[in-house]
Amino acid sequence: MYKTNELLDLEHTLAKKYLKKYEYPYQALKDIKDIILEIGKNLDKEEYEEVKENVWIAKSANVYPSAYINGPCIIGKNSEVRHCAFIRGSALVGENCVVGNSVELKNVILFDNVQTPHYNYVGDSILGYKSHMGAGSITSNVKSDKTLVVVKNKDEQIETGLKKFGAILGDYVEVGCNSVLNPGSVIGRNTIIYPLSRVRGEIKANSIYKDKDNVVNKNA
């Protein structure tokens, strides 16, 4: 399974020093709330304002009045939180991000320059630098039988010990419109997921995912 430094450039998140501690990024999911609280206490008050308890918003960010933000939460510099966005809590949104209309976030880290612009649900997930969720694409974070999430690839199965685990997107991943990332999806860097895809398990970096039986190398 991909290790943290193989998926994510930690220079593009306020959580850099915390994520370094985890060999695999999914291991950080259970600690996101505490990570945000620790970061929030040390933010520069010249750049961030604590608008309510445990909700820190960069003064350069643009948050629409209709957006709902519950703490703990950090909204990074120059990010935009649009009409009727619903941030349920434990969300670290990086710099230059877009949280779009009717998007719901819960227990997530969005690296810098991430876009979740239209009708997305992102829960118990980490989205790497410059990753993008197409309109209507979601992370499914709980298995239908409520058993613990296992990450699968052709060679191994990783027992995560987590009941809730959506997806880890590496840097520069593009997820097509109306795709579903099933619990425990791990997408390697620079990969494209076709629209209307149903993704499960680990997908190699630099791939084009057309369907589960048709995954090709971008450079082939």
Image (cartoon, helix red, strand yellow):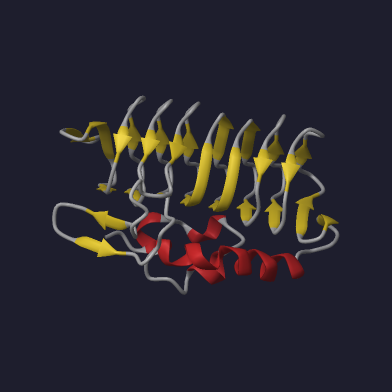
**Quadrant in the picture for the C terminus:** top left
Nearest to the observer: residue 180 or residue 77 = 180
Residue 183 image point, x, y percent: 36, 48
Which residue is located at x 37 percent, y 54 percent?
A: 146
Rendered position, 58 above or below 212: below
Quadrant of the rendered image containing residue 26: bottom left
Residue most toward the bottom? 21
Number of marks in the rendered image? 0
- Percent position of residue 139, x then y: 44, 42
Left or right: 154 with respect to 50?
Answer: left
Residue 52: horizontal and vertical position, in percent? 84, 55
Toward the front, the furthest residue is 145
- Asked if residue 55 is positioned above or below residue 82 in the image, the reply reads below
| Residue located at (54% from left, 70% from top) | 18
For residue 67, say whether it is visible.
yes
Q: Quadrant of the N terminus?
A: bottom left
Asked whether, in this view, residue 126 is left or right of residue 208, the answer is right
- In the displayed structure, would residue 20 be above or below residue 126? below
Residue 167 visible, this orientation: no
Tell whether 73 sits left or right of 146.
right
Horizontal side, residue 202 vs residue 115: left or right = left
Q: Residue, x 67% and y 40% (percent of image)?
A: 86
Q: Which residue is drawn at the image coordinates 72% and 29% (left, top)?
A: 83
Q: Picture coordinates of residue 3 (x, y %)?
A: 34, 63
State the image quarter where residue 35 is shown. Answer: bottom right
Tell me: residue 6, above or below residue 204: below
